Amino acid sequence: MGPRSAKKIFDDSSEQWSRDEPRLLSDWTARPFLLDWCLPVEGKKVLDLGCGEGYFTRQLGNKGASEVVGIDISPGMIEMACKKESETPLGIQYSVGCATDLGTLNDATFDVISAVFVYNYLTIDQMRQSMAQIYQHLAEDGKFVFSLPHPVNPFLAGDDSKFHFKRSGGWFSGKDNIFEGTIAMSDGNTVSVRCMHKIFEDVMISLKDAGFHKFPDLKELGVTEELIEQDEEFFGPLRDKPLHIAMRVER
């Protein structure tokens, strides 16, 4: 039996991902930084690609965007997002869709497009397809903000289950291989995550081929000393380890 599809992974675990407060490790180590990079969004049109159950999307909606659209491949995740929207309306439009096929957007353009931990579920070719379509749907001077697990993370020693991928190939030979993993939650549980391995070169070439020619901002993210001071037990084992990369590029 082959590996589960990304859609299946998230349909099976959609309720575990549902949250209004930080619960996942990356809710502290990545999403706050990514949100800052998206701002300001007041009066702007925003697309959150791979929105999941809408945790990050709702944060964007609460910052005053004039229009927020969330798209995810998992019907289970979109069902959870729509439930949250009905309970606390923010005017967010959610729909099931694929990061490599944005045809349902027609000719719509957005001032900000985010893709939080989407490309670790796609092959390099699929990432290239997605970025090309994002470029077409990004307004002039609009910005594209996205994140990935740090490519070197699976090659670090140790089996710390707080954020861990099991390698299935080398740095170069393992490109596009599936590295299955887990990410910790503050309650002691974990959820399944996946890294389809790619290196920095693959990301940069994909951006260039999509049409982006401005130099992107890049930030390597991990736990901060402030987080460790808040909770040594949860964050301390990950001190000084690269966890994620964030990138921002303008059209």
Image (cartoon, helix red, strand yellow):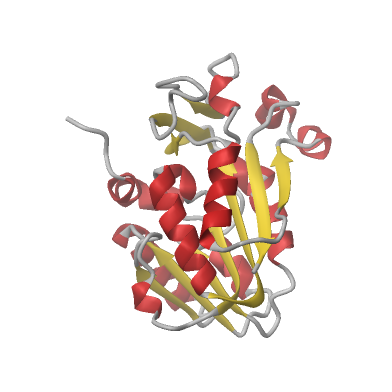
Q: Quadrant of the C terminus?
A: bottom right
At x 53%, y 32%, the residue is 188
Horizontally, is 5 left or right of 87 in the view? Answer: left
Horizontally, is 231 left or right of 157 in the view? Answer: right
Task: Out of 49 and 53, give the one closest to the viewer.
Answer: 49
Q: 139 above or below 221? A: below
Task: Out of 173 and 92, give the one closest to the viewer.
Answer: 173
Q: Quadrant of the N terminus?
A: top left
Q: Position of residue 52 (x, y in %)?
A: 44, 58
Q: 214 above or below 227? A: below
Task: Out of 209 and 45, give the one closest to the viewer.
Answer: 209
* Whether residue 130 is visible: yes
At x 56%, y 20%, the residue is 155
Q: Position of residue 236 (x, y in %)?
A: 72, 26
Q: Position of residue 89 (x, y in %)?
A: 51, 80
Q: 173 above or below 249? A: above
